[in-house]
Image (cartoon, rainbow, N blue to C red):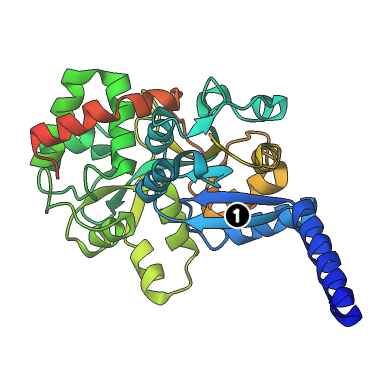
């Protein structure tokens, strides 16, 4: 072998070792996320800027994310799993996709009813399921509770997205916890009887249908309402002049509140970084991102935010319920929906 070849080989080997060392020292975090909000980019970028940990993100819906994790098994590179509904978090827990986390920071910052008792997942933002009605055709006192929407006086006035959509399954799971099986099934029958049309579209579509007069009342996540309130599009401004909201069940249980949350993946290769990220999500700065970026309320009650649209919705009584119970009730709810024909 010539001297030139020996020198070239030595240089190559040295460069390879150096590259491997740099790669080995680079801190990374692999996030499987069902959150698809552009405003979350600032959340991730700030974490990287603050910690130097690079984020690799795999986006998908909740069902697809869970299916992928199950398929990958022990070889999964996922460190953090982000999901947008209590029932979905509970399902992922039941599928054995999380591992328990011990963190005094998370235990102190996140209220007990918004996290798993064994530390498998934590809620980091909340939103309410509010009632939206047509101001010209509906009296607010006729639609001031989830139960009122099932009463005969609202026959032909109700429109909703699919009853089996996770947002509704979580709401009905909470109602099941409050009312018991017999009353909840009767309530769902009333919803079906009062439909102005078959369920179709998402929450924003329901609000538009109420504004147009296609139906008189609907149920929507609060952040969809706030998003339309903040819009500068003439059609959205005109739409919001025709509708108003009611905070449901203010004399009884309070409005249903759901969460977006996250946990450390069972086979996380970067567990320390994953816990660090969850703790970051509970920080004041990250909590404000949730509120000001996607019109959600912080899970950490002490955090003050600046969101005029959310503030204009006013204060309300929220239900106090263990969100894990909502997850546990989902299978029974799906059986009820099938039984009463709520598509």
Look at the numbered disc 1 and give the secondary structure of its residue. helix
Instruction: Confirm whether residue 151 shows in the render.
Output: no
Q: Is residue 11 left or right of residue 131?
A: right
Task: Examine the image and state in which quarter residue 175 appears.
Answer: top left
Residue at image position (37%, 41%) is 129
Residue at image position (10%, 48%) is 156
Q: Is residue 185 left or right of residue 240?
A: left
According to the picture, the residue beneath numbered tag 1 turns out to be: 292
Residue at image position (30%, 57%) is 207
Q: Position of residue 186 (x, y in %)?
A: 13, 26
Task: Examine the image and state in which quarter residue 269 appears.
Answer: top right
Q: Position of residue 51 (x, y in %)?
A: 78, 50
Q: Position of residue 11 (x, y in %)?
A: 87, 72
In the rendered view of the protein, which quadrant contains the C terminus? top left
Task: Examine the image and state in which quarter residue 149 appears.
Answer: top left
Q: Is residue 229 left or right of residue 333?
A: right
Q: Position of residue 59 (x, y in %)?
A: 47, 57
Residue at image position (26%, 19%) is 179
Instruction: Report how many numbered discs are placed on residues in the image.
Output: 1
The 10 Å Cα crowd at callout 1, few under 14, some 14 to 19, many 20 or more, is some
Q: Is residue 127 above or below residue 249?
A: below
Q: Is residue 117 above or below residue 197?
A: above
């Amino acid at each position: 072998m010539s001297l030139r070849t020996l020198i070239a080989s030595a240089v190559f080997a040295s460069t390879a070792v150096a590259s491997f060392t740099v790669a080995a020292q680079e801190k990374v975090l692999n996030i499987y996320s069902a959150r698809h909000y552009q405003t979350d980019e600032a959340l991730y970028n700030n974490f990287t800027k603050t910690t130097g940990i690079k984020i690799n993100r795999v986006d998908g819906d909740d069902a697809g994310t869970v299916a992928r994790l199950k398929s990958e098994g022990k070889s999964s590179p996922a460190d953090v799993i982000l999901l947008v509904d209590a029932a979905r978090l509970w399902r992922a827990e039941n599928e054995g996709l999380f591992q328990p986390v011990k963190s005094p920071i998370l235990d102190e910052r996140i209220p007990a009813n918004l996290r798993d008792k064994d530390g498998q997942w934590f809620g980091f933002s909340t939103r309410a399921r509010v009632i939206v009605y047509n101001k010209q055709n509906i009296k607010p006192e006729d639609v001031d509770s989830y139960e009122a929407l099932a009463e005969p006086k609202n026959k032909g006035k109700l429109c909703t997205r699919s009853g089996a959509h996770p947002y509704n399954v979580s709401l009905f799971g909470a109602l099941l916890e409050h009312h018991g099986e017999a009353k909840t099934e009767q309530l769902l029958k009333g919803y079906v009887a009062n439909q102005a049309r078959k369920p179709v579209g998402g929450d924003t579509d329901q609000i538009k249908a109420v504004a147009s007069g296609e139906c008189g009342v609907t149920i929507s996540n609060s952040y969809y309402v706030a998003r339309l309130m903040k819009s500068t599009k003439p059609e959205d401004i005109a739409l919001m002049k025709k509708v108003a909201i009611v905070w449901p069940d203010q004399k009884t249980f309070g409005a249903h509140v759901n969460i977006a949350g996250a946990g450390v993946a069972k086979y996380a290769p970067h567990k320390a970084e994953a816990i660090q990220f969850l703790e970051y999500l509970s920080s004041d700065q990250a909590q404000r991102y949730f509120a000001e970026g996607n019109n959600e309320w912080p899970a950490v009650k002490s955090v003050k935010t600046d969101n005029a649209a959310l503030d204009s919705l006013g204060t309300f009584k929220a239900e106090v319920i263990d969100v894990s119970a909502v997850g546990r009730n989902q299978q029974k709810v799906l059986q009820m929906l099938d039984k009463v024909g709520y598509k």
